[in-house]
Image: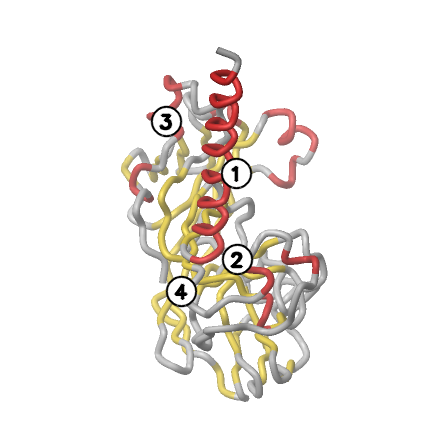
Amino acid sequence: MSKKPKNRMREWFDTLFYGILIAIVFRSLFLEPFNIPSGSMIPSLHIGDHIFVTKWSYGYSRYSFPFGSWHLWNGRVLGQEPKVGDVIVFRNPRDESLDYVKRLIAVPGDTVQMKRGRLYINGKIVERRDAQPYIVAVLPRSVRSVGYYMDNITVKGNKVLVDGAPADFDYTIEYKSDRLCRMHPGMCGVFRATKYIEVLPNGVEHEIIEYSDNEYLDNTTEFLVPAGQFFFMGDNRDNSNDSRSEVGFVPRENVLGRVWFVWYSHNYSSPMIAFWNWNSKMRWDRFGKGIK
């Protein structure tokens, strides 16, 4: 009789141990989930997007595994080189506790510069076309149901209306706590931007947004990407901490993987158990959205 409790405890321990081990191996070698906490990759990724990252895309470094900051080894194994235009999660070289997601803009030997809001790679201006309006709405949660009004624009729930009709342009909407909006009034509001299609030198086309061509990072010195390093930028060009500023060049071994798709997305934080909020909280159209 005394053996049964011990056997049950051992079974419970084995189940927990092997479950954790399988999860660690799966996240390290195959897929790892991340969530997007900032708007630096708008319009490709929105705050509240939850993404899967393929860990096998570029091989493995010590950062691919838990406790990678222990400096167990250097370099990469089974690696393929990232391509310009890939959306990649990497470990911030200035702070190894932070993971960033940005777009790869330049590889070793390339030069990068911003002039009057335009991107130059290896001395040539990068094509930017198809300008369209874009709205970034960051609003207090209390207006989610009643709506927010600015000129001829109405933001209500997950929709933007212009003169009462659905907007014919793209946008992103995020709701924050009323307290946060009161404490930081400049953070909340409806902000007008312009969306472009940018064509990188290797032919990769992707969308970016600009608030203007005269913001803080719209004019830079020329950067020469050193050997073994990469240059990353956010698609939200005027609201991204990237290789143009504090992040700097990113070592090859800091790359974690390529962003695959959005598996879940919401416009504000709320307990999952609060099912009555699901319909207004979820961005259903972003579920399963592939990222390129």
Q: Residues within 10 Å of mark 1 (few under 14, many from 20)?
A: some
Of callouts 3 and 4, the N-terminal one:
4
- Label located before the other in sequence (3 or 1): 1
Question: Residue 138 has which mark?
Answer: 1
Circles 1, 4 touching at the beta carbon (< 8 Å)? no
Image-quadrant location for residue 76: bottom right
Please, what secondary structure does the residue beneath circle 4 have? strand
**Compared to 110, does 40 lie above or below?**
above
Give the amino acid type for the residue marked by disc 3 in the picture: Ser
Give the numbered dot on residue 196.
4
Q: Which residue is mark 2?
A: 101
Tell me which residue sits at (45%, 60%) in the image.
Answer: 55
Q: Looking at the picture, tell me which residue is in the foreground, 195 or 78.
A: 78
Q: Report x, y in % for residue 39.
A: 53, 49
Seen in the picture, residue 86 relative to 147 is either above or below; the reply is below
Question: Residue shown at 47%/74% (left/top)?
Answer: 79
Residue pointed to by mark 3? 280
Amino acid at circle 2: Val
Q: Give amino acid for label 1.
A: Val
Q: Earlier in the sequence, mark 2 or mark 4?
A: 2
Comparing labels 2 and 3, the label whose residue is closer to the camera: 2
Badge 2, how many Cα within 10 Å: few under 14, some, many 20+? many
- The type of residue carrying mark 4 is Tyr
